[in-house]
Amino acid sequence: MLIEERLNKIVEIIRINDSARIEELAETLGVSRDTVRRDLIRLENEGVIKRTHGGAVLNDNRASIVFYDERKNQKLESKKAMGRCAAKLIKKDASVIFDASTTVEEVISFLDKKHIFAVTNSLTAATELTQLNDCTIAVLPGRLDHNHLYVTGSDTVQKLNQYNVDYLLLGVYAMDSGGIYTCSESEGAVKAKMLASARKKIAMADSSKFDTTGLIRICTLQDVDILVTDKFPEGRLLEAMQKAGVEIIVAG
């Protein structure tokens, strides 16, 4: 098991059970207690968990990991409103990278007759894109994540090197004044390369993602051009976004 996979598994176990003990994690993962202790120290340093005597609990400000089937129907009306809003930003005949995100997927139905060239690592987004008229679809290669239905890995990143697209529609796992985060190294590497492969970066996040954090920071706020959301951010996050020059669009 790769280190990244083990860290994700630890977080998943803690999320499901609200806490976990070192002995239980070591037995479940088939590693030593010392290895688990080192993993917990790393996760605590990243702000993901809090260590307790003999175990760990989740950090309260960390965004939770939710699989695709559950995420798809969460905040659906809000996602549709944001999708309609983001679609208006995409010009006809544009090239667009679609990140693997249920919020980003809600943009697709509003892009009919725009004749876009679409690039995605999401199997579900690719399926939705087939419903558009005159849409060319490029599905990225890579290793399939069966829980989230997207591909990641070195092949995905390498293929993205070939693209220089007009827009990126980026789903947000977590964000705060320090930037935008995700929960795994492999997904983070893909998202970072997507950002580097697009001229206009459009992030999409409902307000539940504000002032939360994750294991991997994929970019700073300065790397994003536009945020499409359902509620205007406040406090330190708003100040940081204004300082970074991010245009904030609240879906009506």
Image (tube, grey):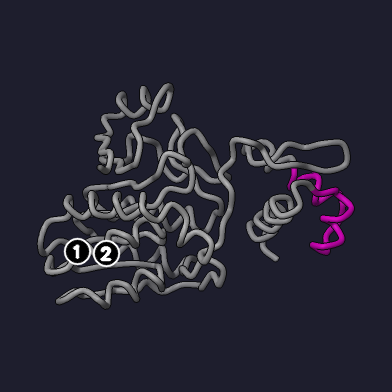
Looking at the rendered structure, which numbered label has been put on residue 199? Answer: none
Looking at the image, which residue sits at the far front? 77
- Secondary structure state at the residue bearing disc 2: helix
Three-letter amino acid code of the residue under disc 2: Ile
Q: Residue at x 79, y 62 (%)?
A: 29
Expressed as whole percent of the image width and height from the top left, the position of residue 238 reads 36, 26
Q: Is residue 175 above or below residue 30?
A: above
**Secondary structure of the residue carrying numbered label 1:** loop
Magenta residues, as a range?
A: 20-40
Where residue 37 appears, x then y in whole percent?
A: 81, 45
Q: Nearer the viewer, residue 40 or 3?
A: 40
Q: How many marks?
A: 2
Q: Quadrant of residue 158?
A: bottom left
Where is residue 250? Give x, y as percent.
Answer: 28, 38
User: Is residue 166 found left or right of 170 in the rendered image?
Assistant: left
Q: Is residue 139 above or below residue 158?
A: below
State how far apart marks 1 and 2 are (Cα).
5 Å
User: Dot 1: within a 10 Å radius of its alpha carbon, few (fewer than 14), some, or many (20 or more) residues?
Assistant: many
Q: Residue 69: where, in percent of width, then height?
A: 52, 66
Q: Is residue 45 above or below residue 115?
A: above
| 79 left or right, relative to 164 | right
The residue beneath circle 2 is 108
Residue named by callout 1: 111
As for residue 100 lying within the magenta part, the answer is no
Q: Quadrant of the C terminus?
A: top left
Q: Give yes or no for contact between labels 1 and 2 (Cβ–Cβ under 8 Å).
A: yes
- Please tell me which residue lies in front, 74 or 241: 74
